[in-house]
Image (spheres, coloured by chain):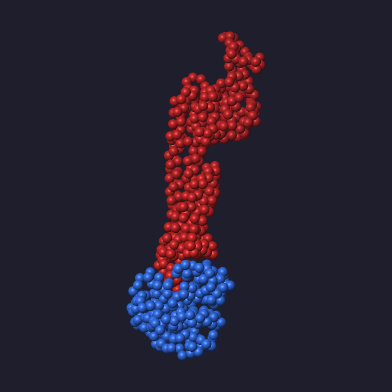
Chain colours: A red, B blue
Amino acid sequence: MNKKHRMFIRMVMASLVRRRSRMIVALLAVVVGATILSGLEMIYYDVPRQMSAQFRSYGANVIFTPSGEGYIRPEDLEKGAAQFSSEELEGYTPYRYENTKIHNMPVTLAGIDFDSVLKTSPYWHISGSMPSLDGETLVGAKVAESLGIKEGDDITAVNTFEVTSETDTSDIPSYELYTDPESGETYCDHELDLHVSGILETGGSEEEYIYVSLKDAAALTISERGYDIVELSVAAMQDELSETVEKINGSSVGLSAKLVKRVTASESTVLTKLQSLVFIVTSVVLVLTMICVATTMTAVITERRKEIGLRKALGALNSSIIAEFMSEGLVLGGFGGVIGSVFGYYFAQFVSMNVFSSSITFRPLLIPITIAASVLVTGLACLIPIRSAVDVDPALVLKGE
Amino acid sequence: MSKLLELKNISKVYGDLHALDNVCLSVDKGEWIAIMGPSGSGKSTMMNIIGCMDKPSTGQVIFDGKDISKESRRKLTEFHRDKIGLVFQQFHLINYLNAVENVMVAQYYHSMPDEKEALEALERVGLKDRAKHLPSQLSGGEQQRVCIARALINSPELILADEPTGNLDEANENIVLDIFRQLHKEGTSLVVVTHDPEVGEVAQRIVRLEHGKIVSDKKNEQFSEQQEVSL
Ligand SMILES: Nc1ncnc2c1ncn2[C@@H]1O[C@H](COP(=O)(O)OP(=O)(O)OP(=O)(O)O)[C@@H](O)[C@H]1O
Ligand SMILES: [Mg+2]
């Protein structure tokens, strides 16, 4: 680097640093633009993830059912679920339905996994709390209403089944057993005491069930068996989903998979629309930033017409004045881009928290993109005022006032 | 003595106002000329034309035997950069550069910036210890001296000064005039525009302008004598 280059840098830096009160206005314009730009970029790239997550709240998008007669065996479920990558698979909930009677009224009881059910049914609203111990139950609002059950009540579920030679009767108290005089067969009215930890409100058919843990369901029926249905929540696009579903159905895993069509199909279109909306907004912001920076730079440069005249009187060619002022603009753009990238992340985070209630993934690659865009926009914005200012006549500008 | 500069039948017309009206003037190498006249008489207009910052409406400017009045703006810029140092009434320092950097700017556009040389130029005008000060931290007289240091840094053949002492008090005026005397002794040509008779009287030759015309052009009889007094 020769002395000339060093002087060039010295002048540019002096102008930026020693005129900082002026430059701060221009910098602010750049920073605001870069912040919004980088924020929207992050949101743009995060929207698919966010939206998928968002759509999950409308319920599971894949269900497994038994292939043919019978139930889904736990080991088959695991094999089937393993077809989705662990990042995509947000959760799955097996359901095991049993008939039961509460207060002598028939009610369907579902054995589920309380830990994962909110992943596949995020819309569940519980007054009270989610059961956390065995012996606790969640009662659907309709059931609760018709049977007069309240949160905190203790209820007894009764399951009637035929006792055969295969039934393990060791845990069954004798008073539960009776023989049907007509057929001569032995039945059991097995009881399970449950504590109501919460009432489930969904506005849908889910309210017509009572829910217990899988373990309690097995205890009630004194039988271990597989599941009737499994709901899965998978954060993936429709194409990918149907591919995996076909793969599962084509394999020898003992279950059949199905897409919940309505949600996944609309998901993709909404997503595309949302992304193009963000894209349009980003473009508009870029143009606005450019106008804003151009206006600020015009003011900053007009103020320096005398200086331009002086430099010309000292022998500066237009090209070198353009180079100096552009460099100031570019440094400003770069610096603004760096600050904007950081602010943009927080901006995106803020938007994401408020709109999607989840945090945004930080994408380092967007930083150089933001800085490049910021430099480019600032450069373009500076070019116009500089080009017009550089034509000043030194004789006119330097004339005493 | 050979001629440095010649204005031949120069006119500068703005609308129907003749800022300069058929002016002829020649400046010898090493000569020190004062241009005097009332406000609006065309002094600055003439300076700008000599300084290649403006073109005459008609007439020729011959510098070093070369007609420069028909050259392109870019050529003129290069030409005046190489031959002429400018001193302004309003100083025109770049406010975000310190004294030495302001001097270096002239080197930068001329050839190669050199901080050591720039400091030496400041030393010549007695401002070495103010080299790192910004213009706003300098007095008017000091700023004018920085301006002079900047004008002489590239060793120009001609220094053009438009009201160099217009904004200065007497003490600072004397400092500036002393610097001019020294430059003159070293063989630099000086053209100084001034209202101030005291500044005019230290020159070798006094040219008077009125309404764009030269009304008198006389050798200054007191010149050599004065120089001895002040030295
Ligand atoms: N760009 C211009 N357009 C129109 N008229 C101009 C222009 N520049 C100068 N003039 C006119 O030309 C005349 C000479 O101006 P000039 O600046 O040369 O005067 P001056 O002798 O330097 O005066 P002063 O001592 O006040 O600086 C003035 O009447 C001025 O109004
Ligand atoms: Mg004037």
Residue A147, by quadrant, is top right
The one nearer the camera, B223 or A220, is B223
Q: Residue at x 51, y 27 (%)?
A: A79
Image coords of residue A326 (percent x, y): 45, 61
Q: Which residue is drawn at 34% across and 74% down?
A: B70
Above or below residue A180? Residue A375 is below
**On the picture, is B170 further left or further right than A282?**
right
The one nearer the camera, B218 or A115, is B218
The one nearer the camera, B59 or B150, is B150
Q: Is residue B47 visible?
A: yes
Q: Is residue B143 visible?
A: no
How many dots with numbers? Answer: 0
Image coords of residue A228 (percent x, y): 52, 24
Image coords of residue A343 (percent x, y): 54, 51
Image coords of residue A398 (percent x, y): 45, 73
Q: Which residue is drawn at 46% across and 55% down?
A: A375
